[in-house]
Each structure stands twice: as C-alpha cells, then as structure tokens.
Image (cartoon, rainbow, N blue to C red):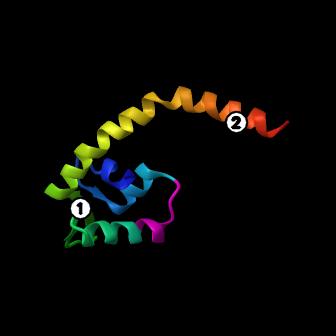
Amino acid sequence: MIIILALEDEPKRFGDLKRCIGDVTQSVLTENLRGLQRDGYLTRTVSPGPPVAVSYELTPLGRSLLEMLKPLVFWSHEQMDNVRIKRMEYDRGQTK
C-alpha cells in the first residue's frame, strides 16, 4: 500500500521511493517492487546513462488500486485518536 501511495503524484526512482517510505531494507523494497510489477500495478523504466536511471510508475491498474486505497488511508487517519484511546485502555488492563 505504501509503495502505491508513494507513486501517486509522479514516477519515482528507487532511492526516492526508499526515502519516501522510510524504514525498509533495499532487498524488501526490491522484492515488493518486483511483485507489484509482476502483478501489473507498476512499470519499471530503465533510462540509459550515464548514470543509468531506473524509475517506477503506476499503471492504469495501479491507479485504480490507488483510488480504492485513498479512502481507507483517510479513514484510518481519522480514526487515530480513537485507536490511541483504545490502546491506552487495553494497556492499562494488561498491567493489572
């Protein structure tokens, strides 16, 4: 989901995606990008260099998934205060 959301506005190079996503290893990001490309959600474009530049972009299928994900992301953001309250209530109950 994070990769799809990160590619919403424009194609991104690998390093840009890694910075945007944050705490992810290079191998995990590579594996996920390959899977999303294999499934048809994004394309990988190699531009000859020097230096060689590899970028990733959403396909029409990826864009349709993005439109389904955005409401879920907005909803989850709106629920964060309630989630924090529930976590505190749960944690208090665990310490008794």
Q: Secondary structure at mark 2?
A: helix
Q: What residue range appears in magenta?
A: 23-29
Q: Residue furthest left?
A: 60
Any part of residue 50 in sight: no
In percent of width and height, residue 92 lies at 77, 33
Question: What residue is shown with label 2?
Answer: 90
**Lower sequence index among marks 1 and 2:** 1
Horizontal and vertical percent for residue 94?
78, 40
Residue hosting label 1: 41
Q: Indicate the quadrant containing the C terminus: top left, top right, bottom left or bottom right.
A: top right
Q: Splitting the image into 4 quarters, where does residue 32 fall? A: bottom left
Percent across and percent down for residue 35 are 33, 70
Kind of residue indicated by mark 1: Tyr
Note whether residue 54 is visible: yes
The mark found on residue 91 in the picture is none
Residue 34 in magenta stretch: no
Question: Up-down: is 50 above or below 56?
Answer: below
Q: Which quadrant of the view contains residue 16?
A: bottom left
Q: Residue at x 39, y 59 (%)?
A: 15
Point 69% across, 30% down: residue:
89
Among the 4 quarters of the image, the one containing residue 37: bottom left
Amino acid bearing label 2? Tyr
